[in-house]
Image (tube, rainbow, N blue to C red):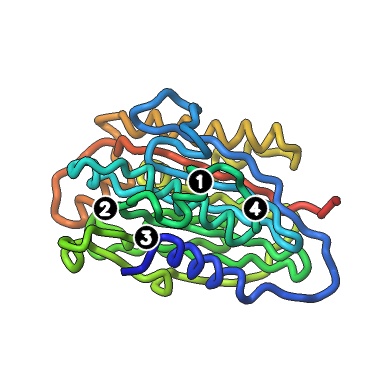
Amino acid sequence: MFSLLSYGRLVARAVLGGLSQTDSRDYSLITASCGFGKDFRKGILKKGMCYGDDACFIARHRSADVLGVADGVGGWRDYGVDPSQFSGTLILILVKEQVHLSSSSPVCFELLQNKVPLLGSSTACIVVLDRRSHQLHTANLGDSGFLVVREGEVVHRSDEQQHYFNTPFQLSIAPPEAEGAVLSDSPEAADSSSFDVQLGDIILTATDGLFDNMPDYMILQELKKLKNTNYESIQQTARSIAEQAHELAYDPNYMSPFAQFACDNGLNVRGGKPDDITVLLSIVAEYTD
């Protein structure tokens, strides 16, 4: 059985292994976050960067900007396991592995070394901008994901990975007696990609709570409100997107993307999908030290 630390290292290496070593350094990401758990008030973070069972991070490496989201699988709660512990710990490990941040917290150290028993599952989506080559490196496992928008059109997006309806690919650690009975995908199964980005490109990284409730055309309408690259404008737009997704999630008459997908799978479903929502909104800008 892989440890959670092993998972974090594998995902980090899968993304960061191909970073360029060229000399130019002039791109960076300006990123804002917004979200909320379905059982918490809007915009309220739990300990760390967590909204409900979702977790996220935004970090700066010496040659790259790195960000990511993880969505703890809620079904573990039926077995007395807090799903946010797994996703939150995975994010802590990714931050440590990619940016080499240190922490003096004994609790954090014990979690990272798996000295505290940890069970659960999580999806994950990691995005890395190499400032020197202007390339975006991505890895997505499950149904979280990202969009890259240029001049009002989606030019790149992640592929959703599902075993079957409403059952995404996921990293998992199960008790020994349940191994083989719990879905567990390898980090190598993540959909990885690398491509060039341009100044002004918008990158939206989010958990499925957004994509299950807002189709692309609604997201693009909200992104039109983003007029400049200052942090306040990005934050305001991220909040607008998250709040609209939240409202739609509780609309029983709305034919959401999730409901449409359910109908496509022979289920008579209508309405939004109440869920934790995490939105990271970034703009590619000129790098300033």
| Viewer-nearest of discs 2 and 3 | 3
The residue where tag 1 is placed is: 108
The disc, 4 or 1, on the residue closer to the chain's N-terminal end is 4
Disc with the residue nearer the chain's start (3 vs 1): 1
Do residues under tags 3 and 4 come within 8 Å of each other at their CB atoms? no
In screen coordinates, is 165 left or right of 114? left
Secondary element at image label 4: loop
Instruction: List the single residue furthest toward the top.
Output: 41
**Mark 4 in CB contact with mark 2 (< 8 angstroms):** no
- Mark 2, mark 1: which one is toward the viewer? 1
Residue 182 appears in the figure: yes
Percent of width and height locating residue 190: 43, 69
Is residue 67 or residue 180 the one in the foreground?
180
Under tag 2, what secondary structure? helix
The residue at which mark 4 appears reads as 101
Q: Residue flagged by tag 1: what amino acid is it? A: Cys
In primary-sequence order, the first of circles 2 and 3 is: 3
Nearer the observer: mark 3 or 1; the answer is 1
Kindly report which numbered mark, 4 or 2, lies closer to the viewer in this rendering. 4
Q: Position of residue 172 (x, y in %)?
A: 31, 60
**Reading the chain from its start, which is encountered first: label 3 or label 4?**
4
Residue hosting label 2: 261
Q: Are marks 2 and 1 in contact (CB under 8 Å)?
A: no
Query: Is 272 drawn above or below residue 160 in the view shown?
Result: above
Amino acid on which the number 4 mark rests in the picture: Leu
Between the residue at mark 4 and the residue at mark 1, the CA separation in whole angstroms equals 12 Å
x 44%, y 67%: residue: 6
**What separation in Å lies between label 4 and label 2 (alpha carbons)?**
40 Å
Q: Residue 104, percent across and down? A: 61, 44
The residue to which callout 3 is attached is: 142
Q: Is residue 286 above or below residue 271?
A: below
